[in-house]
């Protein structure tokens, strides 16, 4: 959340969505695996603790050449408020703090604020990507991302690539929950891992 989101009352209006992401329950007996010619497909089904409740899927395709395909499916549900963001967070070890991306940059930009950004290849790191606002909040987002590589000082790491359409992402030394729960920067924890959010879409 940002200060603008808070001022608009989104923490209250969107509370169910935050719980849906944080407290979803894996339905163990719905887990399936299927071996294909070039990959192993694993499907996880989760139940969200919302009213009304709903289910969503995360499908992993582990290719035999080392690639990993990730697909999230949300069918939509009536009776819920607008979904603020549909995304996945990836937690990596602290040393993977550098990133290079092909997308809109070089500075942070959002779906409703990217006219000043340009398409290109840019490099940064998690600490520099963290905007030191008076109140810790969501920051460091990039739109129109075709790929992002996150890596350590030896250039070892992971590459996230858009399968069908550009995505949004941020690389930060804190999770969204840590930012939401801190009212001042000194209240943020000493970070041992990094969060990489890959939103499929956001509202403006």
Image (cartoon, rainbow, N blue to C red):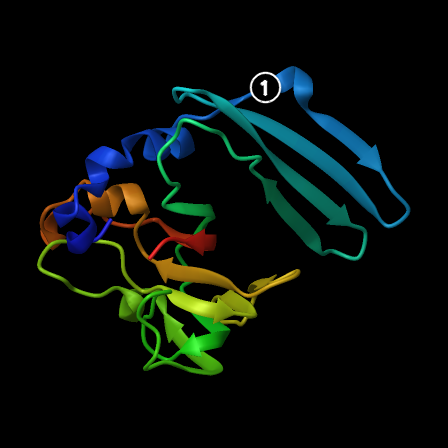
Q: Which residue is mark 1?
A: 27
Question: Where residue 78 sits in the image (x, y, percent)?
Answer: 46, 28
Q: Quadrant of residue 164?
A: bottom right
Q: Residue at x 59, y 42 (%)?
A: 72
**Residue 79 in the figure: left or right of residue 179:** right
Residue at image coords 49%, 30%:
77
The residue lying toward the viewer, choosing from 109 and 40, is 109
Direction from residue 43 to residue 196 in the image, left or right: left
As rendered, which of 89 and 114 lies closer to the eye? 114
Picture coordinates of residue 187, whole percent (x, y): 12, 46
Above or below for 87 versus 74: below
Q: Residue at x 46, y 20 (%)?
A: 53
Crowding near pointer 1: few (<14 within 10 Å), some, many (20+)?
A: few
Say which element carries label 1: loop
* Picture coordinates of residue 48, whole percent (x, y): 46, 25
Between 200 and 184, which is closer to the camera in this rendering?
Answer: 200
Say if residue 136 shows up in the picture: no
Q: Position of residue 56 (x, y in %)?
A: 56, 31
Asked whether the viewer can see residue 104, the reply is: yes
Q: Residue at x 26, y 64 (%)?
A: 130
Question: Residue pushed farthest top?
Answer: 29
């Amino acid at each position: 959340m940002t200060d603008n989101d808070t001022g608009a009352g989104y923490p209250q209006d969107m509370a169910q969505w935050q719980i849906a992401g944080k407290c979803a329950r894996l339905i163990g007996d719905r887990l399936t695996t299927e071996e294909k010619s070039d990959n192993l497909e694993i499907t996880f089904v989760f139940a969200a603790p919302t009213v009304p409740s709903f289910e969503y899927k995360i499908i992993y395709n582990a290719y035999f050449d080392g690639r990993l395909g990730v697909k999230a499916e949300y069918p939509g549900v009536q009776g819920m408020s607008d979904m603020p963001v549909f995304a996945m967070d990836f937690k990596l070890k602290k040393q993977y703090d550098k990133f290079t991306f092909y997308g809109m940059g070089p500075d942070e930009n959002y779906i409703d604020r990217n006219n000043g950004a340009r398409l290109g290849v840019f490099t940064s790191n998690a600490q520099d990507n963290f905007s030191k606002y008076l109140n810790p909040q969501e920051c460091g987002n990039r739109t129109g991302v075709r790929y992002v590589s996150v890596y350590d000082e030896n250039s070892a790491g992971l590459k996230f690539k858009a399968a069908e359409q550009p995505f949004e992402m941020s690389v930060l030394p804190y999770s969204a929950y840590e930012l939401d729960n801190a009212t001042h920067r000194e209240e943020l924890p000493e970070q041992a891992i990094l969060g990489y959010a890959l939103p499929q879409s956001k509202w403006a």
